[in-house]
Image (cartoon, rainbow, N blue to C red):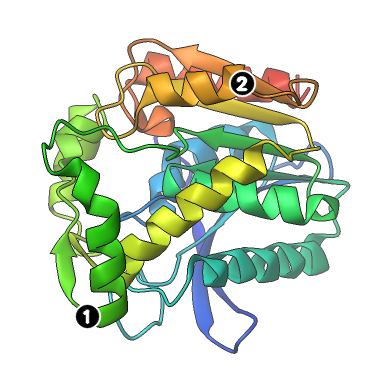
Amino acid sequence: MIGKKSEINYFVTYNGLKMLYRAWMPNKQKSDYVFIGIHGAAVHSSNFQNFGDYFARLGYPVFVYDRRGFGNCDDLIRGYVDSYEVYVKDTIAFIDFIKSKSNPEKTFLIGHSNGSNIATVVAAEYPELIDSLVISSPNFRLKTKDPFSPFRLPLAYTLGNLIPKMKISTFLKPEELVRDSKIWESRKDDPLYTKKVTGRWVREMFNCQRQAKKSLKLLAVPTLILVAGEDKEISSKYTMKLYNSLENKDFVNMKIYEENYHENFNDLPESRLKVFEDIAEFLELK
């Protein structure tokens, strides 16, 4: 079956920057519920294609914007952001924009990887904006065998402060992010796929990571954490440990997919279908 195509449009964020977003619209909308997504690092809004296709077919619109420094964003520098708080403000502006257009009964905020961190901060600081939160493979701790990893944080701060626009490889390998070879092969030829980020972006990734861990403990909206058991980028064990330490489990739930790689929404067809069904059940869409 051919996937449902997204519609492309633009909105103007809080400081006047024109930003692209994609919308997966149902042929027949079931209710006034909407999904708003935040993609991870290096990729762009089309990374939500499988997610958008599934929920649009189910009868729910999905909206995802291209973050600054990635995809088709009209920003000047690839892989750059002044502060992670800019992403928070952009997300709030996007939520307000979608709400002004569709006046939804419920708004579900969906994040993936670094996008999950942003979504967690937004949900904790502005709970009145959303009704539920779903975060896939949140970046609470990077997974690495690099012997120099203890020096990464101070190095990131040094580069972010002294040489903020210096480019650094992401070291991300598409084949280590997803098991579906069709997806990672297509990504290698994607001109919008970002292979390098700046020193400032790396610094702000760590700042956002730190804030997201604090925000997780403050969440007071229904939340579902999706953990990829075979994640090669993020420490799944640390995410589970963090979850087990929470005192707000009345709000926060967790699902573990033992064989999934990092991108739960783009895993093998049968695996991602299970993820989508679990999300639908959590949000009481069926």
In-front residue for pair 27/78: 78
Q: Residue furthest top?
A: 258
Q: What is the count of numbered marks?
A: 2
**Percent x, y of residue 140:** 45, 38
**Percent x, y of residue 161:** 31, 77
Residue at 71%, 48% in the rendered image: 123
Residue at 72%, 70% in the rendered image: 97
Residue under circle 1?
A: 163
- Of the residues under marks 2 and 1, which one precedes in the sequence? 1
Residue at 35%, 63% in the rendered image: 203
**Percent x, y of residue 163:** 22, 80
Q: Amino acid at mark 1?
A: Ile
Residue at 32%, 20% in the rendered image: 268
Residue under circle 2?
A: 245
Q: Amino acid at mark 2?
A: Ser
- Quarter of the image that includes the C terminus: top right
- Quarter of the image that includes the N terminus: top left
| Residue 271 quadrant | top left
In-front residue for pair 182/122: 122
**Disc 1 on helix, strand or loop?**
loop
